[in-house]
Amino acid sequence: MTTADLPAVNAIAAEVHAAYPEDPAVFAERLRLHPAGCYVLDGVQGVAGYVVSHPWRSTVPPALNSLLGAIPSPASTYYIHDIALLPAARRGGAAAAILATLMRHAATLADNISLVAIGGPVQFWQRQGFTIVSDPKLAAKLRSYDSDACYMARELTAT
């Protein structure tokens, strides 16, 4: 992902995650802070999807639509902030392929990878080896996303 991709990323986010709006500054900051964790999927008619990820703190997911300020050092998890694919780009293996790339990268920075699942994709993440982390301290933060949000994590091994 480059800064030139950000308008397309914001448009995809608005379409795919309409119920979870985030300001353009959120994506721009994530790209600036950790460009190695930001990718786009090129489609026939331009950008068809994206992923934004970065090192972070375990069981402390960033609030929706919030700026980070900085990446913590050391980080205790590698956090997937967002992955979104336009409908035409789904079911072709793109999400699993970029996840494999992210996991290789994440394993160089942390021993686990985490995310907040919203909008129903829990089964997809479980098929990728993620498990739901139940922690009462997370309840209020997860409700800020929606009532079905859950924090998920997966252990990583260095390759």
Image (spheres, rainbow, N blue to C red):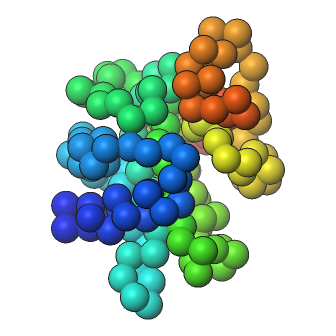
Give percent across and percent down for residue 4.
19, 68
Could one spot residue 45 in this view of the protein?
A: yes
| Above-or-below relation of 129 to 91 | above
Would you identify the image quadrant in which residue 68 lies?
A: top left
Give percent across and percent down for residue 151.
65, 30
Q: Residue at x 66, y 16 (%)?
A: 139
Give percent across and percent down for residue 157.
61, 41
| Closer to the camera in the image, 112 or 49 | 49
Q: Residue at x 70, y 14 (%)?
A: 135
Would you identify the image quadrant in which residue 48 lies?
A: bottom left
Q: Residue at x 43, y 64 (%)?
A: 12
| Above-or-below relation of 3 to 26 | below
| Above-or-below relation of 124 to 2 | above
Give percent across and percent down for residue 81.
47, 42
Q: How many labels were placed on the picture?
A: 0
Tell which residue pokes out farthest to the top in this image. Answer: 137
Q: Which residue is drawn at 29% across and 31% down?
A: 67
Could one spot residue 153 in this view of the protein?
A: no
Judged left or right of residue 63, residue 156 is: right
Judged left or right of residue 117, residue 111 is: left
| Closer to the camera in the image, 29 or 119 | 119
| Closer to the camera in the image, 31 or 113 | 31
Judged left or right of residue 39, residue 127 is: right
Tell which residue pokes out farthest to the front in this image. Answer: 19
Q: Quadrant of the N terminus?
A: bottom left
| Closer to the camera in the image, 151 or 16 | 16
